[in-house]
Every structure is written in structure tokens, then in C-alpha cells.
């Protein structure tokens, strides 16, 4: 509950920055508020108004926002089996399927905690985001330059704080690193929003490499089992699974009378049946996550997307890679995470350090 409120308040307050940016790009107060009410996905909203402010036409700006928002479909795929909401609640809940609600829900130990985290984060964030959007648009002239206040570092700091708990194993860390490389490397080459989607390919790529490594290990084990089987046969085993001992008596070599290869096949079938039983216990759309591999892929996609978003919002200015005060702010947020600081303090550290660096740099 506390983490959910923290995420909702921290990110919700950054609606000020969107309101100011949207008003500065030429959108009216009604248009600005409608975006937050109906679209409600900060990255896509910023992409839209940023493209308009840079002189892009509305269709190009909307396409970039759409591509960036498609990632929420991946989140929905994961959340459908985690939350298992009643059918009547799914349409309104879909409005709240965004980076922050997904990350909070995935970090919870039980389904009940995940539902509470998702609902509290979504409600808090939705209310505060729309309220601060309105206030930001109304007070755009009074606030002045939002970058001078370091508010542009709040987004990547939030994504970093949400990503950190997901990096539990080498697979997650490698996925995040590859997503960062794809997201930043393709930034100058592809339209806005597309590099983040391409970075999601880091998840299946890492799973493919992991699968090859596991299969290679299993093949090695099977080979050793077969060699041992052949050695047993050479030592005098007959077709009944009995071997003549040195004392002239027969001793049973296999308690169950099965060949090693048969036992291995039986174990594999048992594992497959167990995985199918686990998958059938999940409520997913059209059985999309019935296979464990697909389930694993859906779990890794948020890692890749959040990593790419963190990197792009830290080092990107439009389609150009830059190194500015945001990097110092996000580094401060990373240090705060290592020190196990509360979520709000992590975001505050990024904003304060970013603003301080800019103030010192003139």
C-alpha cells in the first residue's frame, strides 16, 4: 500500500510538467486535459506534445505516441493472468495499465497484494496526474522552464526505481542491458517511440540464448546417460535388466526394470504434465500464456521496456543522444536505490541534483 501510494504521488505530481509542456506546444487547456483523461500514459503524452513542439505534424506526432503506447498491450498480457479480474472490471482496469501500475503489481508477493497495488497506484496516479495536468496548464507562465526545476529527471528516476526490483537474476539483468543498447542505438534511426518497441525484442533474444544453453546442457547429460547404459550392457547385463555378480548370484541392476532412457523419457513427460497443470490454473486471454516459455517472455517484456524507457528519458533529446544534467540526477537516484532510500526520496534526489547541476552550469 505504501509503495503504491508513493508511486502514485510521485508520478502523479509530474503531471505539472506535462501540463506546462502541453500548453507550451500550443495545445489548448481542453486538449491538454483530454489527453490526460483519455490517453493516460505519460510517455505517449510527452511524445505527442514533444513532437508537436518540435514542429512535427499531428499525424506523425500521433503515430509516435501510438507506437510508444503499444507496449501497454504487453503489460496487459502479463497482468491478465496475475490479477485475474472479473470480466466486468477489465474494461475500466485497462485504462490504468501503464508502466507504474504494472511494475507495482508485479512486485507484490500475492495476487491479493497485486490487485491492491494495481488499484491504489492506478487511482492515486489517475487523480493526481489529471489534477496536476490542469494546474500545470493553468500556471504554465508562472512556473516558467520546467527543465530548470529538474522535473524532466523525475520520469527516468521513476522508471529506474520501478525497474530495480525486477533485476533479480542474470537473465533479467542481461535483458535490461540489451534493451538499453537497442533503445539508444536505434534512437537516431527510427521514428519516436519505435526504438522502445524494438528494444522489447531483447526479451525473446535472451530467452532464446538461455534455451540453447539449457538444451546443450541436457544433450550433454543425455549423452553421458547413454554412454553409461552402453557400459552396463558391455559388463554383462542381459535384456531383463539383471547382471551376473562375481559370486555367481544375480543382482538386480534396475529396481524398476526400465532402461535409463525410458526413465528419462518418463521424467520429461511428468515435468510437461506438471507445467500444463500449472498453466491451466491461470486465467489468461485465449490461453495466450498457457506455455511456460510464453509466460516467461511476458514476465521479461516489462524489464526490457522499462530499461529502454529509463535510458531514453535520461540520454535522449528528441532523436539525438545527449549527456546533460539528467544523467547526474538519475545517477543520484541510483545511489539512493543502492542505499535503500524510500521511493519518493529517490525521485526527489534525481530532481534536486538535476536542478542543481543546471543552476551551477548557468
Image (cartoon, rainbow, N blue to C red):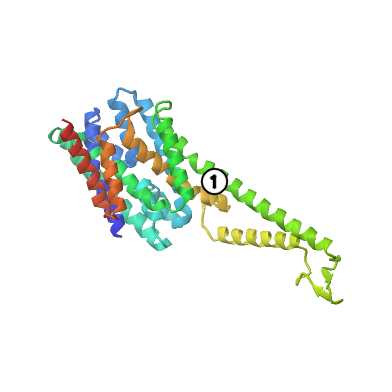
In the displayed structure image, the side of residue 247 where residue 291 appears, left or right: left
**Considering depth in this image, is 15 or 345 the residue closer to the camera?**
345
Q: Position of residue 277 (x, y in %)?
A: 59, 61
**Considering depth in this image, is 86 or 182 the residue closer to the camera?**
182
As drawn, 89 above or below 328: below
Q: Quadrant of residue 195?
A: top left
**Considering depth in this image, is 54 or 185 the residue closer to the camera?**
185
Quarter occupied by the N terminus: bottom left
* SS state under label 1: helix
In the displayed structure image, the side of residue 165 where residue 297 appears, left or right: right
**Considering depth in this image, is 162 or 78 the residue closer to the camera?**
162
As drawn, 126 above or below 361: below
| Residue at (32, 51) in percent of width and height | 122
Decide: few, some or many residues near mark 1? Use Cα within 10 Å; few <14, some 14-19, many ≥20: some
Q: Position of residue 175 (x, y in %)?
A: 47, 44
Q: Specify whether residue 72 is in view.
A: yes
Q: Specify whether residue 290 is in view.
A: no
| Residue at (84, 77) in percent of width and height | 247
Say which residue label 1 marks.
207
Q: Position of residue 104 (x, y in %)?
A: 36, 53
In the displayed structure image, the side of residue 216 where residue 124 appears, left or right: left
Amino acid at each position: 500500500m505504501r509503495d503504491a501510494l508513493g508511486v502514485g504521488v510521485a508520478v502523479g505530481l509530474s503531471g505539472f510538467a506535462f501540463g506546462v509542456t502541453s500548453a507550451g506546444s500550443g495545445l489548448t487547456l481542453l486538449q491538454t486535459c483530454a489527453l490526460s483523461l483519455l490517453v493516460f500514459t505519460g510517455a505517449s503524452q510527452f511524445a505527442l506534445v514533444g513532437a508537436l513542439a518540435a514542429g512535427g505534424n499531428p499525424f506523425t506526432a500521433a503515430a509516435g505516441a501510438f507506437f510508444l503506447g503499444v507496449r501497454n498491450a504487453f503489460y496487459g498480457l502479463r497482468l491478465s493472468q496475475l490479477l485475474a479480474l472479473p470480466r466486468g472490471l477489465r474494461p475500466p482496469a485497462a485504462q490504468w495499465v501503464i508502466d507504474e501500475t504494472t511494475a507495482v503489481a508485479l512486485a507484490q508477493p500475492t495476487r491479493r497484494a497485486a490487485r491492491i497495488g494495481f488499484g491504489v497506484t492506478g487511482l492515486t496516479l489517475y487523480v493526481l496526474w489529471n489534477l496536476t495536468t490542469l494546474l500545470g496548464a493553468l500556471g504554465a507562465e508562472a512556473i516558467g522552464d520546467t527543465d530548470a526545476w529538474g522535473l524532466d529527471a523525475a520520469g527516468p528516476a521513476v522508471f529506474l526505481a520501478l525497474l530495480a526490483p525486477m533485476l533479480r537474476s542474470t537473465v533479467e539483468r542481461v535483458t535490461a542491458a540489451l534493451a538499453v543498447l537497442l533503445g539508444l542505438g536505434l534512437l537516431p534511426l527510427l521514428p519516436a517511440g519505435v526504438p522502445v518497441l524494438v528494444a522489447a525484442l531483447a526479451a525473446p533474444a535472451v530467452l532464446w540464448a538461455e534455451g540453447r544453453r539449457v538444451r546443450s546442457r541436457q544433450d550433454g547429460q543425455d549423452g553421458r546417460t547413454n554412454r553409461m547404459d552402453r557400459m552396463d550392457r558391455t559388463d554383462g547385463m542381459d535384456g531383463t535388466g539383471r547382471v551376473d555378480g562375481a559370486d555367481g548370484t544375480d543382482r538386480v541392476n534396475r529396481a524398476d526394470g526400465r532402461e535409463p532412457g525410458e526413465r528419462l523419457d518418463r521424467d520429461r513427460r511428468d515435468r510437461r504434465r506438471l507445467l500444463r497443470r500449472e498453466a491451466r490454473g491461470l486465467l489468461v486471454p485465449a490461453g495466450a500464456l498457457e506455455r511456460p516459455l510464453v509466460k516467461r517472455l511476458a514476465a521479461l517484456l516489462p524489464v526490457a521496456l522499462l530499461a529502454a524507457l529509463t535510458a531514453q528519458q535520461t540520454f535522449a533529446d528528441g532523436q539525438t543522444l545527449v549527456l546533460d544534467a539528467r544523467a547526474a540526477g538519475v545517477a543520484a537516484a541510483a545511489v539512493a536505490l543502492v542505499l535503500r532510500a524510500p521511493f519518493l526520496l529517490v525521485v526527489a534526489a534525481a530532481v534536486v541534483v538535476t536542478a542543481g547541476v543546471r543552476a551551477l552550469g548557468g
